[in-house]
Image (tube, rainbow, N blue to C red):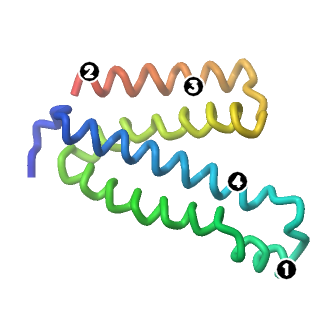
Amino acid sequence: MPTGGSITALVAGLWLVNVILDTTGQLAFKTAASDPAAGDGFARWLHMASRPWLWTGIACYVLEFLAWIAFLSLLPLSQAILLGSINIVAVMVAGRVLFGEKLTSLRVAGILLVTLGVVIVGVGG
């Protein structure tokens, strides 16, 4: 197992795949959960299970799990988990763009701090 934690093309590619799959999965789950036609209670779950968004989210999470394991095999856990934090930023920005969710000044500050942390970890590797 490599212990140097250098950011190679493979590591960067797995990182990008992880971010895309996690973000897509989160957005798919949000879409499934936000369906106004879903109803309440158990009927809501049956409705969500009959729609593709829930299954898209599950598929993304399964694939992300595999990408994450591969990513972890190439980097120390302490570095990988910090680099993986960029998923938070991607989901927040996508939530704003696709669902009109509010980004308060504190959330924007958090986005900037997380991004700065990921850059520091990525460059400092």
The answer to whether marks 3 and 2 mark residues whose Cβ atoms lie closer than 8 Å is no
Of the image marks 4 and 1, the number of the one nearer the N terminus: 4
Tell me the distance, in whole angstroms, between the alpha carbons under discs 4 and 1.
Answer: 17 Å
Tell me the distance, in whole angstroms, between the alpha carbons under discs 4 and 2.
Answer: 33 Å
- Relative placement, left or right, of 78 versus 39 is left
Q: Which mark is residue 52?
A: none
The quadrant of the rendering that contains the C terminus is top left
Give the amino acid type for the residue marked by disc 4 in the picture: Lys
The answer to whether marks 4 and 2 mark residues whose Cβ atoms lie closer than 8 Å is no
* Location of mark 2 (residue): 123
- Relative placement, left or right, of 116 versus 74 is right
Tell me the distance, in whole angstroms, between the alpha carbons under discs 2 and 1.
Answer: 49 Å
Give the amino acid type for the residue marked by disc 3 in the picture: Ile
Tell me the distance, in whole angstroms, between the alpha carbons under discs 1 and 3.
Answer: 37 Å
Give the amino acid type for the residue marked by disc 1 in the picture: Ala
Indicate which label's residue lies in the foreground, 4 or 2. Answer: 4
* Location of mark 3 (residue): 111
Give the amino acid type for the residue marked by disc 2 in the picture: Val
Of the image marks 3 and 2, the number of the one nearer the N terminus: 3
Indicate which label's residue lies in the foreground, 3 or 4. Answer: 4
* Location of mark 1 (residue): 43
Label 2 crowd bin: few (<14), some (14–19), many (20+), radius 10 Å: few
Tell me the distance, in whole angstroms, between the alpha carbons under discs 3 and 2.
Answer: 18 Å
* Location of mark 4 (residue): 30
Indicate which label's residue lies in the foreground, 2 or 1. Answer: 1
Q: Which of the 4 image quarters holds residue 88?
A: top right
Q: Nearer the viewer, residue 23 or 118?
A: 23
Indicate which label's residue lies in the foreground, 1 or 3. Answer: 1
**What residue is shown at x 33% (from left), y 41% (from top)?**
15
